[in-house]
Image (cartoon, grey):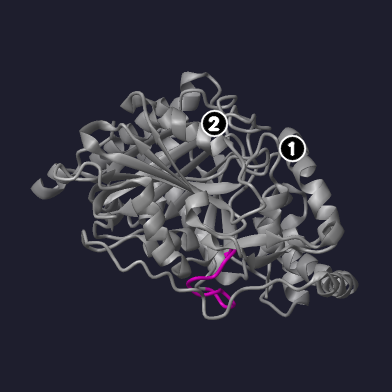
Amino acid sequence: MRQLTALDAQFLHAESPTTTAHVAGVAIVDTGDAAPGRITKGTLVALLRRRAHLAPALRLRLAGVPFGLDLPYWAEDPDFDPADHVYETTLPAPELLTDVVARLHERRLSRHRPLWEMHLIHGLEHGRVAIYTKVHHCAIDGVSGAETLAALLDLAPVGPEPAAARPPAEPVTAPGTLGMLAGAAVNSMTHPLRALGSLRRTAADLDAVPIAATLPGARWVARMARLLGGEAGQAPALPSLEVPRTPLTGPVSGQRRFAYGSLPLAEIRRVGRTFGMSVNDVVMAMCAAALRTWLAERDVLPGLPLIAAVPVAARARPGGRGPGAVGNRISAMAAPIATHLADPRERLLATRDAMRAAKRRFASSPATWLSDLSTLLPPPVTALATASVFRLAGLACPPVNLIVSNVPGPRLPLYLCGGKVVAYYPMSVVTDLSGGLSVTCFSYAGSLDFGLLACPRHVDDVWRLFGHLRAALEELSALAGPAPERAEEAAKVTVPA
């Protein structure tokens, strides 16, 4: 028996006519000149039937508690057939791929079956195909999403496998109606105690929570809460998390725009080694430079740094669930990115220092505020209020300007149904609360593959923004000095058609 956590359910409740809450990705697959038609809906369905037992998120559906009195449960779908989730289409022209993907991403998933879809898209140049896959965020986070993807991929272009689907050893079931109601009654009675614990932990992290961190006395309250909780009173200090008003913030529409491209991972790592930064730190510095240029072009550059939400996997932390788990084990860091600084080196170093401070704080605290905030209200109230609260907060006091997420992927090339995956462009969510832009990247086989998702009400030229990211890397490469000959060859930027 598996029940959604309050954080999992939050992703369900956040959906509205203008907000979807699924994560997705576009795989570009080279089918090879010898067999341009080797990947079809039939071959994908056969693959999924053989391997669905390796990815629980593909087989489970929601089982709601009557009247929404408690959090939903996961249960095996007795009628599960991958063929019901796989679609096939052909583009009239290769350049329409991003338009088709954006429209697919706008549509909500049906909650009456497992929460995922796969779309095989033909018509790309050079005989390649695109495979757009989306899974609801209540079922996976970035890490489990990568694990689900890996279950379908191979290390070599292998031949056909025996078509023998293996059911799970212990099918996941939900309690009956009486069991659900009994569980809801128990959870309702114990909720005040759990909420008090969540409130105490949230208070201890108050100076790291967006919006709350800017309130007078937030750091004093956080220190007192840590002392009362038996923790060290002084935690690593964080820079200001005051969110400037920009075109990126505010409620979103139901439309989406998508842009994608690949940048050389070796060059990003070289910049990181030169300045003592991780790949993710360099990505944040690139976003700072790109967004500064984009905002300056519109004459709306604020005097304060933008605040980015950075999702962080919590599976390796105490209490984290292992591979194959359904649901979310994530937290988030809020960090300023120095869009207010004109000098490239100064901006780079300021972003590096802000990320170091955020990481020190994350490592020294439970960093559970995202889950704790989701737990404060009873499930029936949360289900009714979440979408409205998100929209009101987006209007009145947005907690961040954007989301920037970096998911580590495999270093070696992988294959799908015999075709080589040449790139994988991830897609996240945009919401009223987080603003109209999310930047997601996935490291794969020597490249850092970017997916930029935007609401056109906030960002109507997302391709231009990716161009600024490319220019930002070139600027950082120049700061890092001349590269060795091999690195110079690898520093060529690729943007697939």
Label 1, on which residue? 391
Residue at point 52% right, 50% down? Answer: 84
Location of residue 1 with respect to 236 vertically, above or below: below
SS under mark 2: loop
Q: In the rendered structure, which amino acid carries the disc numbered 1?
A: Arg
- Compare residues 450 and 145 and report the one nearer the observer: 145
Q: Is residue 487 left or right of residue 86?
A: left
How far across and down, in percent of the image, does residue 469 sit?
Answer: 37, 35
Location of residue 131 with respect to 229 vertically, above or below: above
Residue at point 59% right, 37% down? Answer: 107
How far across and down, in percent of the image, does residue 192 sit?
Answer: 88, 70
How far across and down, in percent of the image, does residue 72 sit?
Answer: 73, 62
- Compare residues 137 and 395 and report the one nearer the observer: 137
The answer to whether residue 158 of the structure is visible from this angle is yes
Residue at point 56% right, 60% down? Answer: 80
Question: Which corner quadrant holds the C terminus?
Answer: top left
Quadrant of the rendered image containing residue 165: bottom left
Q: In the rendered structure, which amino acid carries the disc numbered 2?
A: Arg
Question: Which corner quadrant holds the N terminus?
Answer: bottom right
Label 2, on which residue? 256
Whether 150 is among the magenta residues is no
Q: How many discs appear?
A: 2
- Determine crowd level at label 2: few under 14, some 14-19, many 20+ residues with C-alpha closer than 10 A: many
Q: Main secondary structure of the magenta part?
A: loop
The answer to whether residue 493 of the structure is visible from this angle is no
Residue at point 21% right, 59% down? Answer: 157
Location of residue 186 with respect to 40 vertically, above or below: below
Whether 327 is among the magenta residues is yes
Q: Which residues are magenta?
A: 317-329
- Compare residues 190 and 303 and report the one nearer the observer: 190
Q: Is residue 132 left or right of residue 325?
A: left
Marks 1 and 2, how far apart at CA: 17 Å
